[in-house]
Each structure stands twice: as C-alpha cells, then as structure tokens.
Amino acid sequence: MPHVITRKAKPPRILIISPIFAPTADSEAFCGGKMALGLLKRHCEVAVITMSPFNEYMRRKDMSEYWDLLKSYIYEACPIPKTNKLSAILRALKYRTVADTRWISSVISQAQLLHVTNRFDVVYSRSLPMCAHMAGYSVSRFLGIPWIANTNDPWDWHLFPHLKKKTSVIMEVNSNQWLRRTVSNADLITYPSDRLWKFHETLSGIPHRAEVLAHIGYGQQGQPDPEVFTIVHAGVLNFGWGLFRSPHPFLQALKIVQSIIPEADQKFRVLFIGSEDSHMRDLVRDYELTNIVKCTGRVSYEESLQYISSAHVCLLLEMEMKEGIYLPSKLADYIASGKPVIAVSPKTGVVDDLSRHGGICRVDSGDPKAISEIIVKHYTAYKFKHLESYAPPKDLKMKFDEENIISVFLDFVGRVLRQGRFAETKHSQAEYPRDEFYDRKSEMSLNNLDRD
C-alpha cells in the first residue's frame, strides 16, 4: 500500500541541492523553483543550497514574483577559497572527482550547519549540472540520511545527443563514473520520463529502479483575441554548442498556409517568446512572414505565462533526433494552461507518447506540408468555434498538476524513509557495488585540511 503523508503526520524536512535555481533565468531553475514552492504549500520544511553565480549566464535573474516566496529558503554556497595543491589533491581523493571539489566542500559545510539546528529527513539533488549529485552523495553520507537524485536531462554535457561541446577525456571518464555511482547508491532516482530513464540505463550499463516524476506546469487564466488566431511558442531556439530547435519547417508550413488562406496576414499571429537572434529575423524576412510572425524578445517567466494564456494554440519545436528523450518544461505549462498543442517533434519519443492522450497534435519536422495541414485544421476549428475539442483532456492535465506531482513525490519520500537508510530494494548491485560509509574521523581530519 503506498505511503500517504496525512495531515497528522509531520511533513518531511527536505534539503534540496540545486546548483542552478530560481530566480536564475533558466528552465531547470524554474523547474526546481516550482518543486520547492509546491513542497512549501504542503507545509514541508525546505532548505535549498545552490551555486553562487560565477558567470554572466547564472547572473541573469528572472523577475517573476513567484520566486520572491523562496528568498528566505535559499542558501548560496560559494566555493571555499583556493589553497595549495596538496589540499586540492586531498579534496579530489575525498570527493572522488576532478571538478567542483571546493563547491562540494562548501555545500557539505552549509548542510551540516543547517542540519544541526533542525535535522533533515532526506537530501534531494537536482541536475543539471550533475555536480548536484556529487554533493548529494557526500551530504547524504555526512548527515546519515537518505538521498533522492533527480535528473531532468542527459547526465552531463558530453552525453547530450547532437551536442558539439567538448570536454577533456579525464572529465568525461570521471563524469561517467559518477553516473554509475549515483544510480547504484541513491535511495531513489527520478526522471521526468521513462525514456530518459532507459537512456540512462543504456549509458550507465546498469539497470536500475527509478520513478517518473513529470515537471510541474503553471498556467494563467486569459482570453485570446477573438479576432486574431494566435499561436505562441515559448522558450529559446538556439542553446549553442550545436543544440538548435529549427523553426525552418514551421515557417515553411506557415508560408503554405499564407498561400491558401487569403486572410492569413490579417487573421494570423505567431508569437515567439524569448530571445530573438539575427538568424530568426532573417528567416522571417526571407519567407515574407513579417506581418504574421513576431518576436517579443526576452521576457520574465511570469510574462511568458501571460502570453501563453493569450494563445489559441501553443507551438512546441523539438530538435530532430531518432528518439525524443526530453520532456520539455514548456509543454507542461502549455498543458496546464489548457491550450491545444502543435508539436513538431520526433516520430518516436516522449511527446509522441503523450499525444495519445489527446490535446497534442504531433507532426514530423521534415514534413512542412503536414505541419501546414495541422495549422489549417486548428484554424478551421477556431473559425467554427469548436477549438476546445483539441484542448488537453483532464488526465493529461493531471500529469503536470502541481498538487498531484507533489503528492507523488511525498509518497516517494515516505517510502524511502519507511524503508530505512540504503534499503536494498533495487536490483542486485553486483556490477557496481554500493560504496561503504565514510569513516567519520578520517572525514573530519580531511575537512580540517580543506580549510588550511
């Protein structure tokens, strides 16, 4: 029988380790922020240890009011000061990594201080980046509490399909070791989709028990302009390093629609929410779609939800790949907002799986004609006032409902706590044996060396 946290039961105290966290303007930061807010609404005691901003990207702040509620629960861990090479070597040996050792040491110190005043029940690490799990592993052992590890994307940058970013061989080997260590030692692994779970089983070579925990979707109430059929795409297109969601097929399809619907220039509006680059501007101009396609530039997360609420239909663009392993966080917001979704997405993948519920019309990226037919179908439904027949059904909306997801997560926490520390509920660990507990005295000695 699944564990249920009742009103009489004391809510768990959860230490969240999330290097990139709200209000940093990043989709992973938003996902973590929504989880923390959901837990606070359920009266859980939460503390979040994050990474102090060290580059321009992490210094970009999202000004949505949602994150104001989290300020008093966030603790930025600054890397401990650099010392000498001997200390660096000792930290590398202690934490079994060649990177982020000074930050991990700082996280452990912060966690110990917070734990003294009010003991945590569980540590919950979230990536990217995967150093969250290196810290989660060590904190779990220092504090003697269970560890839940959540992975929303491929484990590390060098394992992303189609990514052109390069790292050193030493870093890759060490990262791969940590993937195997994490799936072998965490009390529970969670992924946003079963396809990403199986992807990591293939990468690690270790079949492991895990649970699927979708992203929380946020939606706002709003009324689309009844006179203009509006399609909204939220999120960035170009991530750099070869990761690019091409708008080409959709714009080609829109050009076909423009040629067969005379009133398209007046009655159609397509809004791309997020940073606009010169490539996108050139494409819109070359396709002669400037009357239809508009780009807003960067907006806050809260403003992006307002734009979504003003849409008749939402657009999802995914990268071309053999299998779609990602659950796009903006899809959760589209569904939570109750909007029909046109998904230009891999034929096999997470989005295609979800489309079987209804509410999502998936089409291949290499088929602009098929995309145009989907657009026309939705426009016709809009004209004849039955677009709601394409809206997401209740069972699909429940998959991204905050209350539902938090309840499921608390069930996981309850099960982990009930099973006890490092309960052997997963598969046999013969391929990658579970690490022994650290010797506390030797750890304390090395801690003193860290602070030399």
Image: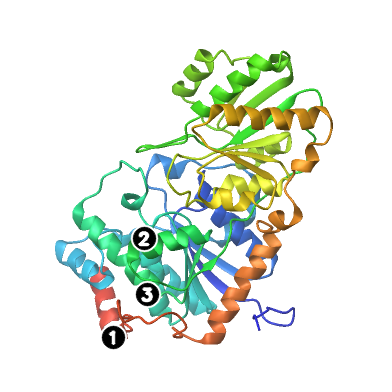
Query: Tag on residue 131?
Result: 2
Residue 337 appears in the figure:
yes
Q: Label 3 amino acid?
A: Ser
User: Which quadrant would the N terminus be assigned to in this image?
Assistant: bottom right
Give whichever of 41, 308 is nearer the camera.
Answer: 308
Query: Tag on residue 441?
Result: 1
Q: Residue at x 74, y 26 (%)?
A: 229
Instruction: Indicate the quadrant where residue 430 lies.
Output: bottom left
The CA distance from mark 3 to mark 2 is 16 Å
Query: Tag on residue 263?
Result: none
Residue 151 appears in the figure:
no
- Mark 3 falls on what kind of element? helix
What residue is pinned by disc 3? 184
Location of residue 212 in the rendering, given as x and y in whole percent from the top left corner: 55, 64
- Mark 2 falls on what kind of element? helix
Q: Residue at x 70, y 37 (%)?
A: 306
The CA distance from mark 2 to mark 1 is 25 Å
